[in-house]
Image (cartoon, grey):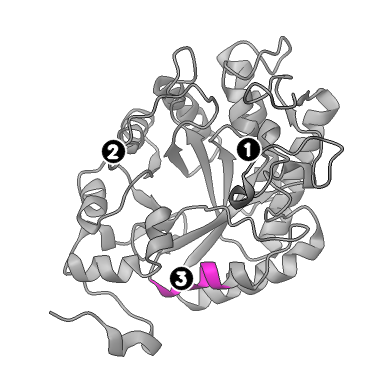
């Protein structure tokens, strides 16, 4: 059997294969509410055979959103529709998680298909963003406000409250979004964190916020449920966060009860130089897995069934996270099983369309 379709047990959860639908922002919410778009988007990929799905970045507060159209989990009213989605995914034999997120200085933007530009505070659909330091992402953008201690405490409280709602909504997994230049990443990186207090300067200080968030979420998140952290394993910028930093962080997160490191990269600096190629980030998952001795997920231009299977078969990562390929083909797992000659269960409603040689 293809290793891509071998089950894996993490804690008491057995995933039927190694395919994860990666978080993908849909920018289709009003006031943070999930709706039928999210139900169909995620539901289709559960029907398509993925073992685990993770919602798009789920904002822990209104100011934590990338855009005014982001998914949110900052109030109890958001729970009902999210519960409808998790129930449907579970009915398809899949598990589902949510990615708790704060955009930091990359907040207050327009939807991508409307240009994606920053919306200045004081304008409609705009607000003051926050960060580790008062440094804008790019020249010409409005600078964020540097979080003071009270602001940091609010962020921690917001993540903790969001985790409680995630549990009530029926999610099996929380993933903290510490990648792609969003708030946690902004604290981790020496490029964006110029603080002189206990949250800046040294490696130990720059990881402090993430560790506080992990501890706060653990206080309310059921021990039997899964806990992942997504990181940008490297910034692709000289003087920035490195893969060796990621290994050091992963070792600490393992002691904190984190189950898996989701290894992405980049996103925190417009100066990044990324050598795009198929599987260009897989080496980071392999290094973190080997040196930190923790489960990892590989992401980044994983587009073919044999490529995905090789990542698992060679031990480079424990799970493969698919984003754009799942957008192109929600049934990728069913197609990959056919291509790899693995026998998998199809939804009974679709069995008459099952691939045959």
Q: In the displayed structure, would residue 34 be above or below residue 187?
A: below
Horizontal arrangement in the rendering, residue 16 relative to residue 102 (left or right): left
Provide the residue span drawn in magenta.
Answer: 40-48
Q: Quadrant of residue 170?
A: bottom right
Inter-mark Cα distance, 3 to 2: 28 Å
Looking at the image, tell me whether mark 3 or mark 1 is earlier in sequence order: 3
Viewer-side residue, 203 vs 353:
353
Q: Within the image, what quadrant is residue 107 found in?
A: top right
x and y percentages locating residue 187 in the rendered image: 63, 24
Residue 310 in the image, given as x and y percentages of width and height: 20, 49
Q: Nearer the viewer, mark 3 or mark 2?
A: 2
User: Considering only vertical position in the picture, is 73 above or below 151?
Assistant: below
Residue with the mark numbered 1: 214
Of mark 3 and mark 2, the one earlier in the sequence is: 3
Q: Crowding near pointer 3: few (<14 within 10 Å), some, many (20+)?
A: many
Relative depth, front residue between 37 and 48? 37
Q: Position of residue 342 (x, y in %)?
A: 20, 69
Residue 179 seen in the current view: yes
Residue drawn 76% across the image and 33% down it: 129
Determine which of the numbered discs, if any, sits on residue 150 in the image.
Answer: none
In the image, residue 67 sits, relative to residue 85, either above or below, namely: above
Q: Above or below — where is 58 with respect to 187? A: below
Say which quadrant the N terminus sits in.
bottom left
Residue at which label 3 appears: 46
Element under label 2?
Answer: loop
């Amino acid at each position: 059997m293809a290793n891509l379709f071998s089950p894996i047990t993490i804690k008491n959860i057995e995933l039927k294969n190694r395919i994860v639908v990666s978080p993908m922002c849909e920018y289709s919410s009003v006031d943070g509410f999930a709706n039928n778009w999210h139900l169909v988007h995620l539901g289709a990929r559960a029907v398509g055979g993925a073992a685990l799905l993770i919602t798009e970045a789920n904002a822990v507060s209104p100011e934590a959103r990338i855009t005014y159209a982001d998914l949110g989990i900052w109030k109890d009213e958001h729970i009902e529709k999210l519960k409808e989605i998790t129930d449907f995914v579970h009915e398809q034999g899949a598990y589902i998680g949510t990615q708790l997120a704060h955009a930091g200085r990359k907040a207050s933007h327009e939807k991508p298909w409307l240009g994606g530009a920053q919306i200045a505070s004081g304008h409609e659909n705009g607000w003051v963003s926050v960060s580790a330091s008062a440094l804008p992402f790019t020249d010409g953008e409005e600078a964020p406000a540097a979080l003071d201690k009270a602001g940091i405490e609010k962020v921690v409280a917001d993540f903790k409250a969001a985790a409680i709602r995630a549990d009530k909504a029926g999610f099996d997994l929380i993933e903290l979004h510490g990648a792609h230049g969003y708030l946690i990443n902004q604290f981790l990186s020496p490029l964006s964190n110029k603080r002189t207090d206990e949250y800046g300067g040294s490696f130990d200080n720059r990881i402090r916020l993430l560790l506080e968030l992990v501890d706060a979420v653990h206080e309310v998140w059921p021990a039997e449920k899964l806990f992942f952290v997504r990181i940008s394993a490297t910034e692709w910028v000289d003087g920035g966060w490195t893969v060796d930093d990621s290994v050091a962080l992963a070792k600490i997160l393992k002691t904190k009860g984190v189950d898996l490191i989701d290894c992405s990269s980049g996103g925190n600096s417009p100066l990044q130089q990324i050598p795009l190629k198929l599987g260009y980030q897989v080496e980071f998952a392999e290094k973190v897995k080997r040196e930190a001795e923790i489960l990892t997920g590989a992401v980044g231009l994983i587009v073919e069934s044999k490529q995905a299977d090789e990542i698992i078969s060679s031990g480079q990562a424990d799970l493969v996270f698919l984003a754009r390929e799942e957008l192109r083909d929600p049934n990728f797992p069913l197609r990959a099983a056919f291509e790899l000659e693995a026998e998998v269960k199809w939804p009974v409603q679709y069995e008459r369309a099952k691939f045959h040689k």
